[in-house]
Amino acid sequence: MRFRRATVLAIALFVFGFGEELWIRYVPEYLRTLGASAFVVGLYGTAKDLLDAAYAYPGGVLSDRLGTRRALLAVGALSTAGFAVYFLWPSVAGIFVGLLLVMAWASLGLPATFALIGEEVRGGGRIVGFTVQAVLKRIPIVVAPPLGGLILERFGLREGMRIGFAVSIVLSGAMLVGLARGLRGGAPEEARVLRGSPGGPVRLSSSLRQLLVADCFIRLCEGLPDVFLVVWAIEVVHVTPAQFGVLTSVLMASAIVSYAPAAALAGRTEKKPFVLLTYVFFTAYPLAVVASRSFGHLLLAYGLGGLREIGEPARKALIVDLASPATRGRTVGLYYTTRGFAVAGAAAIGGALWSIRPALTFWVAAGLGIVGTLWAAAFLPARPLDGKEAAA
């Protein structure tokens, strides 16, 4: 069946994400109950960002050498082992050790997910593939955190978190079984390309380098105010925590609703306008938040913020288009590793700006967004060359 393997992957992303979203947003508070200082909690966030960057390229190598099916099974098993560490070793040290494994699926596995969609679908269909992937990754963010909160209220933070870890072990185990069965029978021509691919370093094509530069500016725009959004909402605008939860749901719902029409249009036209559109919304979001002075204003701002995802499937499809099939995993890995390390200090910069004046964090973020948008508009070709450019 056409797109069968991409569909299996999308379902796996949903199952894994649902288990993780039950508890992942409560880990900082869980660390506090385990005796961690505020510095250690901050160190946890920094460690996540650095691992996210460091794992991407090795994940690409793994995908190119093992193939997408074996790579996804390997990283899924590592993350499942990480959940087991969390469950069996309820301590600050256990959280940091387990994090080394838990991050495998999201970071080591990222290039393999891109490569599998690239193998399975062609042309405009890639945008549809990335759209389905994005929607199924975000639905758990709408549904699972409130359910996880109810579990924590019922059983207490420590026992509630361990219940969440146990659910993740069960769901990720089921995901691995589904992947093992559902990803059989990959395209033979792609398998031959992968087996014959060189093992050396890869280069990003000229078009992909231009996209990467713009993307780094945009992700700095996102990262500077990211951890301060809840602080601005609660301490400056004076909304309640429950209202902030509503804002998060509005953000995700807006993103989900925007995907389908944008993907349908982008599949028939050029991808660049949709990349630029998503960059415009990234830039406008911090401006809308910093201008908000009531819950109603924030509802509008967060609805606007969800539209940041409108061109994300087109951007991801463009990355795949610009990567040679023989080195697709490593190319995606190199792209995300470079971007990850480039923006890893964004939260610290945002904190420094916040200490001067809270609004400054949002204004500087918007300025970086403008630079990234203008860079993409000026230097990203309307019709970028395909992945063969990478081998030039």
Image: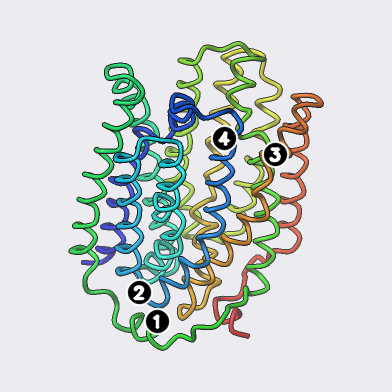
Is residue 212 positioned above or below 19 on the image? below
Name the N-terminal-most of marks 2 and 3.
Answer: 2
Q: Which residue is mark 4?
A: 40
Asked if disc 4 and disc 1 are in contact, CB closer than 8 Å, the reply is no
Q: Is disc 4 placed on a helix, strand or loop?
A: helix
Q: Which residue is mark 2?
A: 67
Label 1, label 3: how many angstroms apart (C-alpha)? 40 Å
Residue pictured at 43% horizontal, 37% vertical: 257
Name the N-terminal-most of marks 2 and 1.
Answer: 2
Q: Amino acid at mark 3?
A: Ala
Q: Amino acid at mark 2?
A: Gly
Label 2, label 4: how many angstroms apart (C-alpha)? 37 Å
Q: Quadrant of residue 305?
A: top right
Q: Amino acid at mark 4?
A: Val
Residue pictured at 44% horizontal, 51% vertical: 103
Asked if disc 2 and disc 1 are in contact, CB closer than 8 Å, the reply is yes
Name the N-terminal-most of marks 4 and 1.
Answer: 4
Name the N-terminal-most of marks 4 and 3.
Answer: 4
Q: Which residue is mark 1?
A: 194
Q: Is disc 3 placed on a helix, strand or loop?
A: helix
Asked if disc 2 and disc 4 are in contact, CB closer than 8 Å, the reply is no
Nearer the observer: mark 2 or 3; the answer is 3
Between 173 and 381, the residue placed more toward the observer is 173
Q: Is disc 1 placed on a helix, strand or loop?
A: helix
Residue 205, image x, y percentages? 63, 74
